[in-house]
Image: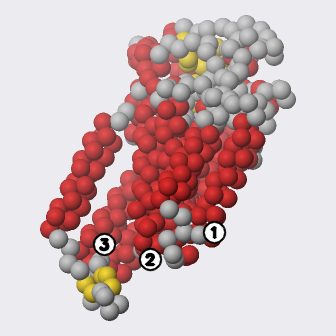
Amino acid sequence: MTHHLLEICYLIGSVTFIIGMKMMGNAKTARRGNLIGAAGMIIAIIGTIFLHENRVENIDGVPTEVPVSATVYGLIFGAIGLGTVIGWMTAKKVQMTKMPELVSMFNGMGGACAALIGLMEYEQNRNQTGALIAIIAGMVIGSVSFSGSIIAYLKLNGTMNKPIRLPAYNIINTIVMIGVIGFAGWMVYASPAGHVMLYALFAVALVYGILFTVPIGGADMPVVISLLNSFTGLAAAFGGFLYDNYVMLTGGILVGSAGTLLTLEMCKAMNRPLSNVIFGAFGGGGAAAGTGPDVKGSIKDVGVSDLAVMMNYSKKVVIVPGYGLAVAQAQHVIHELEMLLEERGVEVKYAIHPVAGRMPGHMNVLLAESNVAYEKLVEMDDINPEFDQTDVVLVVGANDVVNPAAKSDPASPIYGMPILEVDRAKHIVVNKRSMSAGYAGIDNLLFYDQKCSMFFGDAKKALTELVAELKTMD
């Protein structure tokens, strides 16, 4: 009876995961979808704790039910309670600029859990080939995801603000990767190995995760985060195979497949194959802003009064948000600017590049926090044809995703990457704190366009002044 109830719990959990993920594809329903998925996870956890049949074989080989002690229940719920409190408080307090780092850290914890499952279950299943394959695969992939996610976290929070380029790092990484795969295969098929070899494989997998992520530059971090997320899902799926746990298997497959599809979509948006992201290590450096050989001309800046007049008499304004908007926490001010312009009859839209920010969908989440209508967020392919009819494009904190070098400079490392074609608008205004290079570390030719003006200053402060100036023009 309890077995059937547990299967029903797992079925409910699996269905809610699928429904929740489907709903998270739309900003309007994303929050509800997240709650539905969380509810399914709670049902699956409670079912596992209270309905799982804990059986062991006695001396005669007959399965016997072993009751779970109060101490074990206490440890389980104590761990759940501690994790819930830490996760809740962390998620509530995190700033939007720190969200990519939090995602990397949480994803790394998922990989660590998968690796720990392999370390704990190895002894009992070392003579069962099928189970051993799931254990070793889950442990290796989880370890790579864990160490890679920690490096991504350190890159995102600025601790490792420059990629480390080892000599012939592609060759080194490839050798280590082949070594990890060969070592794992030997652990499964050669002979049951001892714990020393198991921990050696664990350590080598951790090293590979570090080597895999360290050379990759900032501009590719959204792709890497998504890829590591798919690794964690795959590792969890192997755990589902091991425990014959359908909800764990379903969840792992969903996370792994969604992460993989998102990774491929972002690579498509950058017009680069995944192999080039992993082995090309793009985005790690470049010339200092304004010093590149292809940069010609001078820049001009615009004052808040002139910009207010320009926007007040426009018919159509497109705002391009970037990471600088998140850093300044100016999403609420930008929404106030949008509403103020619309009151004056100006059409306002937001242009969203697939890899803007530090993680997939970063700008969508940021603007949703300030209650910007989802319909106003227009993807790159849809907004590009509209720039010809746009009076003013206001770029706030974005850099690489609007750099015309991607179209005009074959020597640029971002050449061929689809961009927001803001240079086609009648007027371009770029809000930046300085002329420093973007996350990719390369010069932005847009700043020297005759139609472009620089609106220097912290985004929140500058936009607040702009809103105040517009209000005086009533």
User: Which mark is on residue 379?
Assistant: none
Choose the circle earlier in sequence order: 2 or 1: 1
From the top left corner, tell me how far across and down residue 2 is, in percent.
27, 85
Q: Give SS at disc 1.
A: loop
User: Which mark is on residue 244?
Assistant: 2
User: Which mark is on residue 48?
Assistant: 3
The amino acid on which the numbered mark 1 sits, given as a three-letter code, is Ala
Q: Residues within 10 Å of mark 3 (few under 14, many from 20)?
A: some
**Which residue is disc 1 drawn over?**
190
Choose the circle earlier in sequence order: 2 or 3: 3
Quick check: 159 above or below 225?
Answer: above
Q: Give SS at disc 2.
A: loop
Image quadrant in which the N terminus is located: bottom left
Image quadrant in which the C terminus is located: top left
- The residue at the point 63 percent across, 58 percent down is 183
Whether residue 233 can be seen here: no
The amino acid on which the numbered mark 2 sits, given as a three-letter code, is Asp
Residue 393 found in image quarter: top right
Quick check: 249 above or below 26?
Answer: below
Q: CA distance from mark 2 to mark 3?
A: 12 Å
